Amino acid sequence: MQTPKTTSQNHGSVLLVTLVITGVLGLTLASYLTMIGNQHRSVMRSQTWNASVPIAEAGIEEAMVHLNKNCMQNDLNPQPVNWNADGWLAMSNGVQMTRYLGENKYIVTIVTAPPYSQSKPAILSEGYVPALFSKRPSSVFFAAAGVEAHQTPQAQYVGRKIRVKTAKDGLMIGAMVAKDYIDFNGNGVETDSYDSEDPAY
């Protein structure tokens, strides 16, 4: 009795087809994971970029308070002008303040150098938020050989800048201003005026 010869040709083609299908599936999966990772990084970068705007706006608010409280003299604020009050540092082009809000920070400058002036300064506020994928100092202790104790990785920041032009308006914003409301029904309406050039008044 003679047994038929079996060849490994069929087995080799099955193995080759299996390897090709596995490679295609692996390449597809790797491409999909790369696309998902890029989309995630893009979304987080956009959120970080947008989060720096409120930080810069906080700097503008602080500069406006400083201008109204310490730098503008009027009938309501008779105190002398003091540009360096409340921790503001004198710079070559104006005064500057840096403040940290957790990991975030803003650097705001009140620019009085030309083309601006002390009566019409500009506010330049820079808001910074740590980048999502930057190296930050870890709060967990890990032993490391060859690293000095003072060496800590620095966080990289994403920043936005906002420039605001200011102007000092008069105390009175109109010729006639109502404190509560105006009723034009024709009853009890009285106005009075005077000549502002007359020194008697």
Image (cartoon, helix red, strand yellow):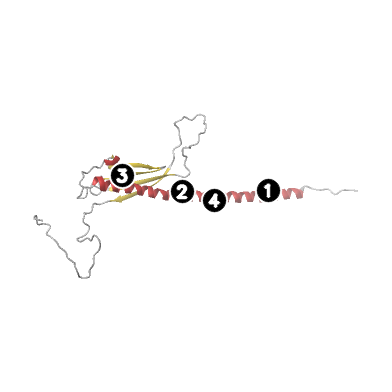
The residue drawn where x is 75% and y is 48% is: 11
The residue drawn where x is 26% and y is 48% is: 68
Of tags 3 and 4, the one toward the viewer is 3
- In the image, which disc is placed on residue 36? 4
The residue drawn where x is 48% and y is 51% is: 43
Q: Secondary structure at mark 1?
A: helix
Q: Could you classify mark 4 by the number of other residues whose Cα lies within 10 Å: few (under 14), some (14-19), or many (20 or more)?
A: few
- Residue at the extreme right of the image, as rendered: 1
Q: Where 21 sits versus 145, above or below?
A: below
Q: Could you classify mark 3 by the number of other residues whose Cα lies within 10 Å: few (under 14), some (14-19), or many (20 or more)?
A: many
The image position of residue 9, as x and y in percent, is 76, 49
The image position of residue 35, as x and y in percent, is 54, 51
How far is disc 4 from disc 1 in space, using C-alphas? 26 Å
The image position of residue 84, as x and y in percent, is 26, 40
Q: Which residue is mark 1?
A: 19
Q: Which residue is mark 2?
A: 45
Q: Could you classify mark 2 by the number of other residues whose Cα lies within 10 Å: few (under 14), some (14-19), or many (20 or more)?
A: some
Residue toward you, 38 or 4: 38
Q: Which residue is mark 3?
A: 109
Of tags 1 and 3, the one toward the viewer is 3
Looking at the rendered structure, the kind of residue marked 3 is Thr
Q: Secondary structure at mark 4?
A: helix
The residue drawn where x is 77% and y is 47% is: 8
Looking at the rendered structure, the kind of residue marked 1 is Leu
Looking at the rendered structure, the kind of residue marked 2 is Arg
Q: Secondary structure at mark 3?
A: strand
How far is disc 3 from disc 4 in space, using C-alphas? 40 Å
How far is disc 4 from disc 2 in space, using C-alphas? 14 Å
